[in-house]
Amino acid sequence: MDYPDFAPKLIDWYNHHQRDLPWRHTKNPYFIWLSEVILQQTRVAQGLPYYVRFTEKYPTIFDLAAADEQELMRLWQGLGYYSRARNLHATAKLVVAQLDGKFPERYADLIKLKGIGPYTAAAIASFAFGERVAVVDGNVYRVLARIFGVDQDITSTEGKKTFQSLANVLISPHNPSVYNQAIMEFGAVQCSPASPDCLLCPFQEQCVANATGQQNKLPVKAKKAPPRKRFFHYFVVEQNGKLALKQRTQKDIWQELYDFYLLEPAAPAASLDELDPNDALRALLQNASKISRSDGFVHLLTHQTIEAIFWRVTVEGEKEITLPEGLVFYSATQIEQLPKPVLIGNYLVANYTF
Ligand code: SF4
């Protein structure tokens, strides 16, 4: 198809089919940034309540910069990829401390901020400030690959360059903001991954994928490695109605969230002996009045599958024990306030009244 036809046709489609979403009613770069970070790796239906909660709790970048880290992580709970929340906080602090709370207006400056990559920088620069810089996300790859029949791998450096160049040529010089929103919306609504609505598509006649029946083959994406399997054995130490938790400080999933004492063998283990507890844990187990083992919990993350067993270790009230390093007893009310991985939250809901 002719390149000049592309943007007007797309914008016309958008004017008739766009969903009414709260971040579409603002030019405030802070709200646009929040929405874009929340929506990374997240469906709109899932991200929308988080966006509403964040904008209510932190209505300005000054509020976010001054936020209590633990409270922020708690608000993020369930969205996954927790480094996004930490980066939001770090960038808010920097923009407040060094830029008087004013977001940079140019793509070239935005991309220097922590947690803001090419896609988010392009979204903020174009939506808030009208800069002509094309966004390229999963939706855009799909739409361009199908309409123009581009069969390069979208995960390869070469492929990324090709799509970015094409997107830069296609973007409307008159209305880059609406164009960028239109192409993403078109990918999400009309040209969806599994069931593109080709029959009612304005690009039906020009689309290479439609003409050649390649909707399911485009875009081309190299096969991902299968998820890594991990085996978690949690020890839930319970005394006087309190449970012992610790903050995860290591560079791993769920950094800074709270979970229980954890042993992670390389292969599934059926008994405590197979787990080979260390001295601190062994001493704790010897003091327990009761130890019970849960059924397995399977928890799926994008790149990992976790098979978790919970060992409930009950210690009588008056017994003096030494908790392994990092563990602290918390009451039910305190635990409710702690940011926790969904796996831990699910276990608590299934086994306790909080
Ligand atoms: S014709 Fe089908 S595959 Fe092509 S752009 Fe339209 S919805 Fe997508």
Image (cartoon, rainbow, N blue to C red):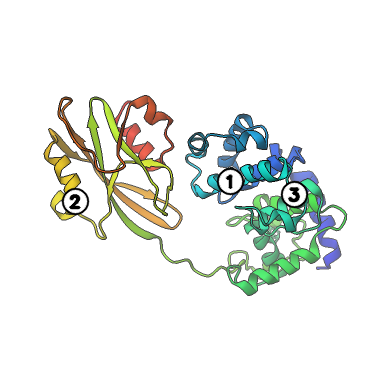
Name which quarter of the figure residue 315 lies in.
top left
Please tell me which of labels 2 and 3 falls first in the chain: 3
Residue at point 32%, 38% (across, down)? 245
Please tell me which of labels 2 and 1 falls first in the chain: 1
Which residue carries the number 3 mark? 104
Type of amino acid under label 2: Asn
- Above/below status of 164 relative to 246: below
Q: Quadrant of the N terminus?
A: bottom right
Locate residue 12, reporting x and y percent: 82, 50
Secondary element at image label 1: helix
Which residue carries the number 1 mark? 90
Secondary element at image label 3: loop
Q: Who is closer to the viewer here, 97 or 319? A: 97
Locate residue 94, reporting x and y percent: 64, 46
Please tell me which of labels 3 and 1 falls first in the chain: 1
Q: Who is closer to the viewer here, 144 or 348? A: 348
Judged from the image, the quadrant occupied by ligand 1 is: bottom right
Residue at point 31%, 35% (across, down)? 328
In three-dimensional space, the C-alpha distance between marks 2 and 1, rounded to whole angstroms, equals 37 Å
- Above/below status of 127 relative to 57: below
Q: Quadrant of the C terminus?
A: top left
Locate residue 252, reporting x and y percent: 41, 54
Residue at point 64%, 68% (across, down)? 213
Residue at point 75%, 68% (across, down)? 166
Which residue carries the number 2 mark? 278
Type of amino acid under label 3: Pro
Q: Who is closer to the viewer here, 309 or 153? A: 309
Type of amino acid under label 1: Ala
Classify 10 Å Cα crowding around label 2: few (below 14), some (14-19), many (20 and above): few
Secondary element at image label 2: loop
